Amino acid sequence: MKNTIKAGIIGLGGRGIGLLKQLVKMKDVEINAVCDLYEDRVKEGSDMVFKAKKVRPYETLDYTEILKMENVDTVFIFSSWESHIKAAIQAMEAGKAVGLEVGGAYCVEDCWALVDAYERTKTPIMMLENCCYGKYELMVLNMVRQGLFGDIVHCSGGYLHDLRDEITHGKENRHYRLNNYINRNCENYPTHELGPIAKVLNINRGNLMVSLTSTSSCAKGLKQYIADGKATNPELKDVEFKQGDIVTTVIKCINGETIVLTLDTTLPRAYSRGFTVRGTKAMYQEDNNMVFEDSKHHRLHFAGKVLWNNAKRYHHKYAHPIWRWYKKEGVRGGHGGMDYLVLRAFIEALKQGTHTPIDVYDTASWMVITPLSEQSIKEGSKPMAIPDFTRGKYLNRTDKADGRFNID
C-alpha cells in the first residue's frame, strides 16, 4: 500500500486549476510537477502548490518532461479534449497512473488504442467523471441495487448547460470549445449524463451499449448570441458554426434497455443534467427531484407536482454509503462535493492497489459516443455499432473496485 501519491498536473485551465485547489489540500498527495501550454497558467498552478505545500513543483510547457520524472508516479490530465487520449497513452507507456478529465474522443481508433495501452501496460487509469459521485445519482444507484425500481427499462440525461459566453469568448479565454463548435457536430460531452446511467445499467459488467443513432438540430443559437452583441470577438460575426443547438442520441443496450442523451449548450436555458431512471416499479427525475413509486404514488399520476422535491426525504433513508460517510466527514470541494469524491476514489485505488471505480473500459465506451454520434449525424442519423471494448469479458468480470468508493 502506498502512503503518498506523487503527482504531475497536465493542463491548468479553469478545470485544471479548480481540481488542483482540491489536490493541494490532500496530505497524501505530492504535486511535483505542473504543466500547461501557457506560462501564466503554469505560474498560477506552481504558486498554488507552493502556497499549500511550501515546495515549488517543477514547471514545464512540455508534458512529456513530466513523464520522465522519477518523482512522479501519477499524472492528472486536465488539458484540452483533443490531447486526452494521446497524453494518457504516453503516460501509461511511461508507467504513470492516469487520472483523466472528462471529454469525448475524436475517433473510434483512439478509444481502442487507449484500451490496448492499458492491457499492454496494466497501468491504472480512471476517468474522473465527478457526476458518478453526485448525491442523488448515488442515491438512485443504491435504490436500484436494492430493487426498489424493479427492472430498469430506460434512462435519459443530458449536458444541458448554456455555454454561449464560454464558447464565444474561447479565443480570449484560450478555451478549446470554440474550435470544436466551429468544426464539429456531435454529442461532444456525453459522460456527465452517461456515466451515472452506465453504472445503473451495469454497462461493461453484464450489459453493453451496442448501437446508437444521433440527430442534430440546426445551429442558430450562437449566431443569434453574436448578432445580439454579446460576444467581443469580431471575427465570429460571419462564422458558420457546425455544432447543432440540440443533439439527441439514442442508445440501445444488449439487454434491451434504451438510453437517450441530449446535448443542449447553445440556447438560453437553466442548467440541468436531466438524470432520469425508469423502472417497472419506480422512476426518478432530476429536473423536479422526484421519486415516483408505483406502490405509493399511483393515484397521484395526475397530481405529480405534490411529489416534486420529495427525493430529499428519500435521501434520509437511501443515501448511498459513500454519501453517509461523506456527510459525517464533512462535504467539501467543487460541484457540490463531487470533485473531492472522484479525486479521492482515484487516489485511494492507487494507494491500495485496487481496481479503479471507473476503469479503462468505462472510459473508452463513454468517450466513443462522441465520434460515433458525429458519424451518425453525417450519415443522416444512421445507426452506428458501439464496440465491446471488453472483448467479451463483460459477461463474467470480477475485477471490481474495493473499498469505500466502489460504485460497481
Image (tube, rainbow, N blue to C red):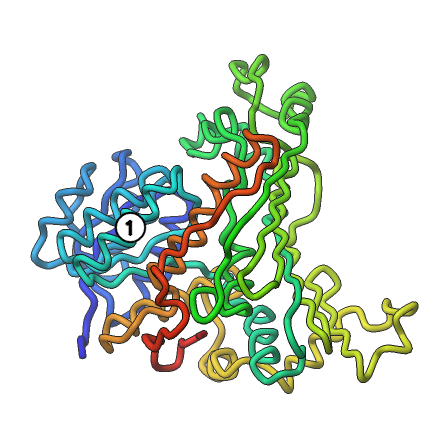
Query: Closer to the camera, 18 or 152?
Result: 152
Q: Position of residue 395 (x, y in %)?
A: 41, 71
Residue 6: quadrant of the picture: bottom left
Q: What is the tally of numbered marks visible in this picture?
A: 1
Q: Is residue 345 above or below residue 102?
A: below
Taking the spot 48% from the left edge, 42% from the top edge, the residue there is 370
Instruction: Indicate the quadrant containing the C terminus: top left, top right, bottom left or bottom right.
Output: bottom left
Taking the spot 32% from the left edge, 43% from the top edge, the residue there is 110
Instruction: Indicate the quadrant containing the N terminus: top left, top right, bottom left or bottom right.
Output: bottom left
Q: Amino acid at mark 1?
A: Leu
Q: Position of residue 157 (x, y in %)?
A: 62, 55
Taking the spot 64% from the left edge, 57% from the top edge, the residue there is 156
The residue carrying pointer 1 sits among few (fewer than 14), some (14 to 19) or many (20 or more) residues within 10 Å by Cα, namely many
Q: Position of residue 180 (x, y in %)?
A: 47, 31
Taking the spot 40% from the left edge, 67% from the top edge, the residue there is 394
Q: Is residue 372 above or below residue 258?
A: above
Q: Is residue 239 above or below residue 140?
A: above
- SS at circle 1: helix
Q: Position of residue 24 (x, y in %)?
A: 30, 61
Residue 90 located left or right of residue 133: left
Q: Is residue 256 above or below residue 321?
A: above
Residue that carries the numbered disc 1 in the rendered image: 114
Residue 89 located left or right of residue 58: right
